[in-house]
Amino acid sequence: MNPSTLYAYIKAATDLFARPNDPVRLDAWAERLGLHLKDLERINTLACSPTAHPIMPGVPLAPTAAATEPNDARPDPAWAERVANAFTPSPSQAQTCAQRVRQAFSLIEEHDALNAFETTRHARALERAAQLDAQHQPDSQLPLKGATLAVKSCFQVQGLPMTGGSPALDPITPTQSAPCVARLEQAGAIVLGTTTMHELAYGATTDNPWWGRTGHPADPTCIAGGSSGGSAVAVATGMADMALGTDTAGSVRMPAALCGIVGFKPSFGLIPTTGVLPLGWSLDHVGVMAKTVEQVALLTDIMSGQNRIRSASGPMPTPQQLTLVCPQNYFFDAIEPSVKQAFEAALATLQHHGATVQRVTIPELDIAPTLQFMTLCAEASQLHQDLALLRPQSIGDEVRTRLEIGRFIRAVDYLKAQRLRQQLLVALSQHLGPNTVLATPTVPTGACPVQTHLTLGGVRLPIHPALTRCTLPFNLTGMPAVSVPCGEDKNGFPVGLQLAGVVGGDAGVLRVAGVVEGCLG
């Protein structure tokens, strides 16, 4: 297919369905779809196995599927204690809840230029802190007592505007918080405010035309990643102890890696998305960011309901018991050399501690960007036909165009992508087992200035697909994946190591990540 044929297809489809025939919009659609000509061509040439059923979105994990071990598996005492006390300050650093909140708002003011927060609630946070300071419940009942929380602005938070980062949505001030937020608050967390995000969560830079761009903590002229960029910056700078984000193509793990913190995307459906603005319902995950693996483990336990996953269940592996499966294709086809160097150095360190590294080729990975484009483009477009696209003039041009071109994705191509997602899941899962995870770079570059394209290892890609190419396979498959810091690139920016495991194996992935974090220091 050439560009002129693509333009003719777009115009014919627009005429067929009596859409407004605006030459400016036609040109914008053709230009944007033109970036994905190879995807449109590839989906037609790919073959599905006759037994490949579509991945079925919207079916949460059964409660018994959440951990790799039975719920009565004996926990590792040391790991269990670390998880349980992940947010408990040491005696020498003990503060009242009110002191912690005041310190947080002092840092928010100090780092105001980074534009991490969209809205804050100082008075309500201090009021909640005073209530917690007056309580004398055991720490086991309030494991997050006084810990500060930043929430992406696509979550319902009682009393705070939920904007989705766009004026195209009807303004909402929820009367109750999303269940995942409420569970953290019930455990003692104090919400500081909502964070800046890429418009409608549909992008990777958190360069928002309405709320401004979120700057990287180490260099405000560089991106912090997205779409949950404000949440990542809030944690990286200490403004918040923890933060929530959504992850549809890597929007938690990617900014976490760029900002040098831990980001975890659980198995699909483990944490409820009720009260969260959707983007692509078969790809959307609620994710969490914090400074350590045990912290994200505790937060996942709480948000999922503690009977769903016990991060401390089962024995803690030793480094010698770990097997890291490293695909040699796809993840290294477009990568900045110093990022690859940092990743390989991390693998060498883990091998020095006794871990086994297996290098494999998984051909099914190579089509992942095509499957992501077909799936997300169609789902986001259909979703926003009745939401943001009712006010297209109130959407930034980049996101508006991406939403509008979804109407040109054929149903047969969307459905084929869902069948191929299932084949990808099978191909990845066959390499996994107890204490055996996939290991990849989280992002193929370090933080960089905002630009339309990146050149990585000689390969030029649009910036959004470039930043998400390492993370998106695990949204397509619903597999749990965590990013932990593993070094620096040539410019001194953080690099992340991504670990992914079997669907439902969240507890095992987090335990492996805890061991890896300890080895890498």
Image (cartoon, rainbow, N blue to C red):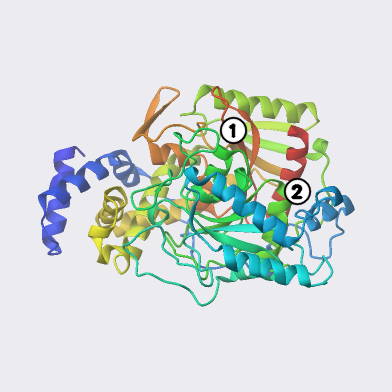
Residue 79 visible here? yes
Horizontal arrangement in the rendering, residue 439 relative to residue 69 (left or right): left
Quarter of the image holding residue 257?
top right
Q: Quadrant of the C terminus?
A: top right
Determine the residue positioned at 47% across, 47% down.
115
As displayed, is residue 72 above or below residue 502? below
Mark 2 — residue?
511
Amino acid type, residue under disc 1 in the picture: Val
Crowding near pointer 1: few (<14 within 10 Å), some, many (20+)? many
* Along the line of sight, the residue nearer the viewer: 492 or 190: 190
Cα distance in 3D space between marks 1 and 2: 21 Å
Mark 1 — residue?
495
- Measured from the top left, where is residue 495 in percent x and y? 59, 33
Q: Secondary structure at mark 2?
A: helix
Residue 250 visible here? no
- Measured from the top left, where is residue 232 in percent x and y? 56, 47
Horizontal arrangement in the rendering, residue 17 relative to residue 161 (left or right): left
* Along the line of sight, the residue nearer the viewer: 366 or 204: 204
Quarter of the image holding residue 442?
top right
- Measured from the top left, where is residue 250 in percent x and y? 51, 47
Quarter of the image holding residue 151?
bottom right
* Image label count: 2
Determine the residue positioned at 32% across, 51% down.
399
Horizontal arrangement in the rendering, residue 8 relative to residue 149 (left or right): left
Determine the residue positioned at 35% across, 65% down.
383
* Along the line of sight, the residue nearer the viewer: 418 or 119: 119
Query: Mark 1 against mark 2, which lies toward the viewer?
Result: 1
Q: Secondary structure at mark 1?
A: strand
Q: Earlier in the sequence, mark 1 or mark 2?
A: 1
Q: Quadrant of the N terminus?
A: top left
As displayed, is residue 76 above or below residue 386? above
